[in-house]
Amino acid sequence: MPNTYSQMYAQCVFAVKYRKSQISEDWESELFAVIGNLIKENGCDLLIINGMRDHVHTLFRFRPSINISKVMQGVKAKSSKWVNESGYCKDRFEWQSGFGCFTYSQKEIKTVFKYIENQKHHHSKFDFHGEYLKMLTAHQIPFNHQYVFNGLI
């Protein structure tokens, strides 16, 4: 739409089903490339992707016309299919249902970028459970402790 201007950034975080540590360092860069391409195919501009053996963080710019839920639905479905067809896991690979989505202003992007870039160092000190609850709290997202990790632990 002419004369529509925006600069919106989202960090989406999603985990392997049951928090299984299935993402191997041997093929994670290929997986991240697949996820990045899927994000781009949905009209978003990927800034960075990184993660651990059991979860992934993405940071991308999007437009007002983008439905992030649809983007993530496609990303998760197609990337899990890619993992399974590639034969990288002896067990079936699946993502958990749902995801976390957190938005940021332009002035926060460098900090979020560095945070995602340094996931392996960060997780040598903090576990995913604590990290995720901290993100929900920092963004004032209401949640029920009973359900936030239901079926994952």
Image: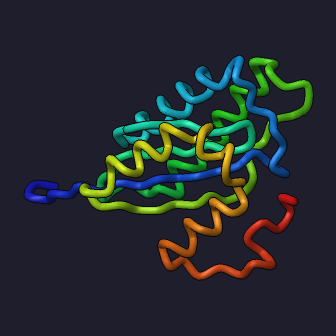
- Residue 44: percent from the left, percent from the top? 37, 42
Outermost left residue? 3
Image label count: 0
Question: Where 97 sits versus 136, above or below?
Answer: above
- Residue 33: percent from the left, percent from the top? 53, 25
Q: Indicate the colouring scheme.
A: rainbow
Give the position of the N terminus as an image quadrant.
bottom left
Q: Residue at x 83, y 58 (%)?
A: 152
Question: Where 115 sits versus 106, above or below?
Answer: above
Question: Where 95 sits versus 87, above or below?
Answer: below
Viewed as shown, does residue 13 lie left or right of 66? Answer: right
Name the quadrant containing residue 106.
bottom left
Viewed as shown, does residue 17 lie left or right of 108? Answer: right
- Residue 124: percent from the left, percent from the top? 68, 43
Give the position of the C terminus as an image quadrant.
bottom right
Q: Residue at x 52, y 53 (%)?
A: 12
Question: Where 88 sits versus 54, above or below?
Answer: above
Name the quadrant containing residue 132.
bottom right
Q: Residue at x 29, y 61 (%)?
A: 105
- Residue 36: percent from the left, percent from the top? 48, 32
In front of the other: 6 or 125 = 125
Outermost right residue? 91
Q: Residue at x 79, y 20 (%)?
A: 88
